[in-house]
Amino acid sequence: MSDEQNWLARGATSLTLMMMGFDTELDQQLTKLRNVLRQENLQLSEFKIALEDVERVYDSLEGITDKSIDTYKKTFAVLLEETGADILKPLDKEQPLLSDLLKIAEPLARHINTLAYSPRIDRADEELDHLRLRLIRRFKSLLETLTLMGDDSGSLQRLDAMLEGEPSWKMLDELASKTITLLRKRLSEEKKQFEGYLSQLTEKLTRINEIVEADSATLSELKQINIDFNSSINQQMSEARMKIDNQHTVATLKTDLLASLDLIANRLQEYQSSYGAKLQDLQASKVEMNDQIQSLEKENLALLIELNKERKMSQIDPLTQLPNRQGFTNRLDEELSRAKRYKHPLSIAILDIDFFKRINDEFGHLVGDKVLRMMAKEMKKVCRESDFISRFGGEEFILLLPQTNLQDAKIAVDKLRRHIAQCPFHYQNKPVKLTISGGVAELQENEETDSWLDRADTALYDSKRNGRDQVTAA
């Protein structure tokens, strides 16, 4: 082996030793290359083959390394989001190496350890929390509507108390179960009441039918009395004529005629007596039937008045005197029909009092109720006559803006927001700052109502998340 080959062999051997320990397959090929280099007479062909095998394995490892580093970089970037940008700088090279990956190991470990002991709100958690708050508002609206129908046992108040303090999912599930049970019980009670009313109605109708049948029988009897009377009178008249024809003396004729007149008078008296009695029966039946009908009409009228009263009450929020969710739904159906018919734009806004729970906790629910009444009054001042404002439940209001596109709706709602922020409100001579957040959405073509409301609700949620006291357009 020449000196040049000897130096080449020594350098290649040193290089193989330096590369040992990174990969099993690479170690095997490096061992083969080293054995070729140790031969007394170096065969260039064998050296070339062994070196190509080493290069092949190395190239494969290099590709895997590059891909792995890229994968790690993307994974860490997602994990760290914006906060870990400085940590990942060593991997921003055009071709980062394993050593660069090792450089971020220690600071990455410290950062992940910090995240493990610090609260971190995931986007999915935010969405679930938003959904939970929406369910709480929906439950409040439902319980308020049920309260309008009465709460003598206090069951609804106890259920409403469960909504204080933003209850957990478990408590919401328990509340849903208790609410369903209460609804079933109430429906059962109302069913019994209605069945009782139907039973009374059936009795009255049965009695009226009996009176009608009795009157029909009385009329038949009257008809028969008339027939019998006419027949009897005709017979007496015929007998009188025969006596007149057969008698030859005036004295005998007079006696017979007087006897016939007495019979006719008796028949007439019997007829008048029977006819009068039947007429009295008919008059009594008429009076009783009129009483029954008037009683029935009064009960039906009272029922209609009560139903209309309950219908109106079911559509009005008793605290703010604004339409409630049911009233809003009825108006919404009208506006949707009108918007589709005339191709007019239609927008909606969901408004929520900021930090209302803090007001209730700090000042009490009576003050919270006063705030709600004041809010309703001030909102009605700013809204246009064509707008429709209602209380959607809890501290949430909903505003319907007919013939209004998204841009104009946002301007109108923002005007309302500024007005509320400027309204003076004091408690025990202390000013209380009140603001509202809003979400606005315009109805899109062929959009479902629930989807439309969800977009407005999501926009409201964005206003809350971005600092409150603002209006966001969906």
Image: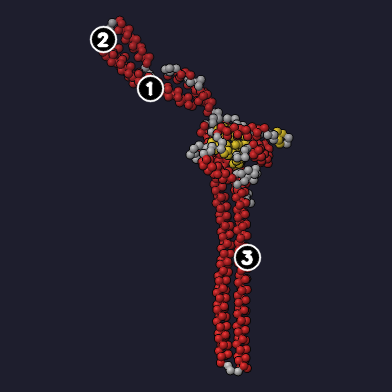
Q: Position of residue 237 (x, y in %)?
A: 57, 85
Write down the residue under mark 3. 291
Establish if 173 lies above or below 27.
below
**Residue at the image point whose x is 30% and y is 16% from the top:** 52
Label 1 near label 2: C-beta < 8 Å?
no
Q: Secondary structure at mark 3?
A: helix
Identify the residue at horizontal 68%, vertical 37% (top origin): 363
Label located before the other in sequence (2 or 1): 2
Most foreground residue, 129 or 59: 129
Quadrant in the rendering for residue 171 = top right
Of helix, strand and loop, which one carries label 1?
helix
Residue in the foreground of this view, choosing between 231 and 381: 231
With 233 as the anchor, is 31 left or right in this view? left
Expressed as whole percent of the image width and height from the top left, the position of residue 84 reads 51, 23
- Residue 64 image label: 1
Rendering colour mode = secondary structure
| Distance between mark 2 and mark 1 Cα atoms | 36 Å
1 or 3: mark nearer the eye: 3
Residue 452 visible, this orientation: no
Q: Earlier in the sequence, mark 1 or mark 3?
A: 1
Question: Looking at the image, is mark 2 or mark 1 nearer the viewer?
Answer: 1
Q: Quadrant of the N terminus?
A: top left
Q: Earlier in the sequence, mark 3 or mark 2?
A: 2
Residue 424, given in percent of the width and then of the height, sits at 69, 34
Which label belongs to residue 41? 2
Q: Nearer the viewer, residue 121 or 5?
A: 121
Disc 1 to disc 3, C-alpha distance: 100 Å
